[in-house]
């Protein structure tokens, strides 16, 4: 099937933000008296809705308050990202040279997505092409986010290539009917869906697919 547009996830796909975000949460938990490592937290966060993970943590540790923890995370994240956030290898070269429509579809709020893209020099390539789960009120693995992204570009979803680095994102793309690329994901991570996607470790491979 011909590809007419590419839909990119943001965190962990276009920008190397997931490790930084988990570091922030580790620090916030420590300030509240909860000691968990980044290694312990990363699997909880990868590709999942932030609010769901925070609710789980607050359920496990009575010292935590979900509203306060979320507010402190949202306040601290832009500061850390502006200091340390980098684009994923090849991301800028890829998006600046794509000859088809493109957009970002992310579980994060618009402000966080825009900060991530601006800091890494990617934002000019996605002006007016950012779709947030908070706008759509549907978070991956719900396919609605991917469907809306395709609609905003005026492209049939089955002619979109979705580039994702998490299982919830992959499942959202498959459920929507998009063609899906799993970036830096192993067969073990994909499980029974490994045969339904193309696995890549280099973003620039996407250029050869459109």
Image (cartoon, rainbow, N blue to C red):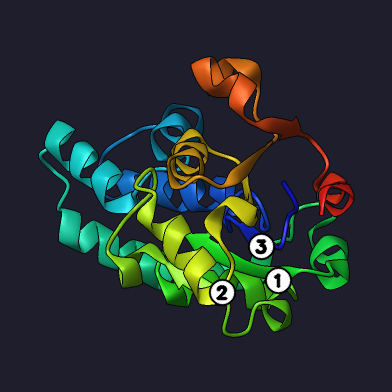
Query: Is residue 38 something one can see in this rendering?
Result: yes
In-image side of 175 versus 2 (left or right): left
User: For residue 76, what is the image quadrant?
Assistant: bottom left
Is label 3 in contact with label 1 (beta carbons under 8 Å)?
Answer: no
Is label 1 in a helix, a strand or a loop? Answer: strand
Residue closest to the eye, 145 or 81: 145
In the depicted structure, whether residue 86 falls above or below residue 152: above
Pointer 1 residue: 101
User: For residue 14, what is the image quadrant?
Assistant: bottom right
N-terminal-most mark, 2 or 1:
1
Is label 3 in a helix, a strand or a loop? Answer: loop
Query: Is residue 107 something one can see in this rendering?
Result: no
Q: Where is residue 18 in the image (x, y as percent from the top left)?
A: 55, 48
Label 1 packing within 10 angstroms: few (<14), some (14-19), many (20+): some
Q: Where is residue 74 in the image (x, y as percent from the top left)?
A: 37, 68
Task: Name the residue at 63% across, 20% down.
Answer: 195
In-image side of 30 versus 197 (left or right): left
Is label 3 in contact with label 2 (beta carbons under 8 Å)?
Answer: no
In-image side of 133 versus 34 (left or right): right
Is label 2 in contact with label 1 (beta carbons under 8 Å)?
Answer: yes
Residue 85's mark?
Answer: 3
Label 3 packing within 10 angstroms: few (<14), some (14-19), many (20+): many
Q: Nearer the viewer, mark 3 or mark 1?
A: 1
N-terminal-most mark, 3 or 2:
3
N-terminal-most mark, 3 or 1:
3
Q: Which of marks 3 and 2 is in front?
A: 2
Pointer 2 residue: 154
């Amino acid at each position: 099937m011909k590809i007419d547009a590419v839909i990119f996830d943001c965190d962990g796909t276009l920008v190397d933000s997931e490790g930084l975000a988990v570091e922030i949460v580790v620090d916030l938990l420590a300030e509240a008296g909860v000691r968990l490592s980044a290694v312990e937290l990363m699997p909880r966060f990868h590709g999942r809705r932030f609010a769901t993970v925070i609710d789980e943590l607050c359920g496990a540790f009575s010292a935590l308050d979900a509203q306060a923890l979320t507010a402190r995370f949202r306040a601290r994240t832009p500061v850390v990202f502006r200091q340390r956030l980098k684009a994923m290898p090849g991301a800028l070269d890829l998006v600046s040279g794509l000859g088809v429509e493109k957009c970002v579809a992310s579980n994060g709020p618009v402000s966080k997505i825009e900060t991530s893209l601006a800091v890494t020099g990617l934002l000019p390539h996605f002006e007016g092409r950012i779709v947030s789960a908070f706008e759509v009120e549907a978070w991956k693995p719900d396919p609605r986010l991917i469907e809306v992204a395709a609609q905003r570009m005026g492209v049939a979803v089955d002619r979109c290539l979705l580039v994702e680095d998490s299982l919830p994102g992959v499942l959202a793309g498959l459920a929507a009917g998009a063609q899906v690329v799993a970036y830096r994901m192993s067969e073990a991570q994909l499980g029974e869906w490994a045969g339904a996607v193309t696995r890549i470790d280099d973003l620039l491979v996407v250029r050869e697919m459109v």
